[in-house]
Amino acid sequence: MQVYLDNAATTQMDVQVIERMTEIMHECYGNASAIHQQGRKARAVVEMARKEIAKMLNCSGPEIIFTGSGTEADNMALRCAVNDLDVKHIITSKIEHKAVLDTAVELHLKGLVQISYVKLDILGRVDLNHLKELAAENPKSLISLMHANNEIGTINDIVAISQIARDNNCFFHTDTVQTVGHYTIDLEKLNVDFIACSAHKFHGPKGVGFLYKNKRLRIRPLMTGGGQESAMRAGTENVMGIAGIAKALEIANRNIDVKIETVQRIKTYLKEQLTSEISGVCFNGDTSESGGLYTVLNVSLPPHDNASTLLFQLDMNGICASGGSACNSGALSSSHVLQGIGHPTDRSAVRFSFSKFTKQEEIDYTVKKLKELFS
Ligand SMILES: Cc1ncc(COP(=O)(O)O)c(C=O)c1O
């Protein structure tokens, strides 16, 4: 049996997205900057996608800048804040995605910023009182805190964080790579400066994402050499990818409440089964329905001879899961997120992540195999 439980790393593409992209590849091959008919046709696809995405997120079209990935969008937010918004201090946490963490550290090593790391509780939630103190001590900082953690699923209260940012004259970037396409996002209500998004996390194509940049901000491009994306990102537009991300988001937002309920049921079922079948199992991060992603369950397993080769053994049994973020796969103990929440080093952890395509039989099979491995 083949079981795919690594949807936080990437998802299977929706057939309708593939069809839409195929249509664009066949019929819309012009360069979107060209002034002839084929160019104008491609331009219309790009601008329609931007408009549709903006409508779904309740922002305006020019606030969406298409990028090649979520990583690029995170980079743009941090680097442009430092280059163009006079940011000299970044407030972040030790469990952010490396796209944020490594970028902040590089900017620090270049002498451009100081970094403060906000305290977290044992579930990986931001300590809002500490954040208030840091923001008050360092006005005009960039606060970069993720909406939901990709390894343990813990969701941050970004409305509260955004309020702290506003009260203290700070900028706020939130990495929403694990939440756009999974929850309804209303940017008008969130009142943030930047969000980062990636299509392949919600059944769209790899290699395309976007940065949302609040219209009140003036920043310059990181990538130069052309006037694309309103001169914010040079480079010929990935027209089929852009059409793909818009289609994927449209499908993801359709009947979103039903999807949330269905996938949450799968997660709860796995949690219950593991609790009853494997003694000593526990779970990392906030696994409550309101406090954690319905797509992620991070399982902490008791010490066992099979623990160090767990992902390999699951793979041998046809089960795709992960030890953390995709780049950390296979390196169970080295996850910076688990270290950041003080996960005991004598236990191994595995992240199971779900999508609308996950079936209960896959969960039953996985529990059976884990039980065999940990008996
Ligand atoms: C929270 C988070 N941020 C950023 C990224 C990077 O996105 P991309 O794969 O599009 O570069 C990921 C992907 O793992 C993620 O989970």
Image (cartoon, grey):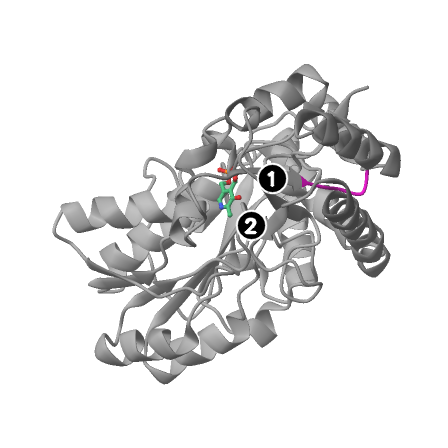
Lower position in the chain sequence, tag 2 or tag 1? 2
The spot of residue 115 in percent (x, y) is: 23, 59
Q: Which residue is mark 1?
A: 351
Q: What residue appears at the point 73 percent right and 26 percent down from the top-left corner?
A: 372
Vertical placement of residue 263 versus 157, above or below: above
Residue found farthest to the top: 316
Does 268 sit left or right of 38 as displayed?
right
- Residue on which the image places disc 2: 152
Give x and y (percent) for residue 262: 85, 52
In front of the other: 211 or 357? 357
The residues colored magenta run 353-357
User: Can I make out residue 325 in this image?
Assistant: yes
Residue kind at label 2, given as amino acid type: Ile
Quarter in which the N terminus is drawn: top right
Q: Residue furthest bottom?
A: 167
Residue 149 — which label?
none
Q: Residue furthest left?
A: 111
Q: Is mark 2 within 8 Å of ligand 1?
A: no
- Residue 23 visible? The answer is no
**Number of other residues with Cα within 10 Å of mark 1, as a class: few under 14, some 14 to 19, many 20 or more:** many
Please indicate whether residue 160 sits to the left or right of residue 105 in the image. Answer: right
Query: Mostly what secondary structure, the magenta segment?
Result: loop
Q: Secondary structure at mark 2?
A: loop
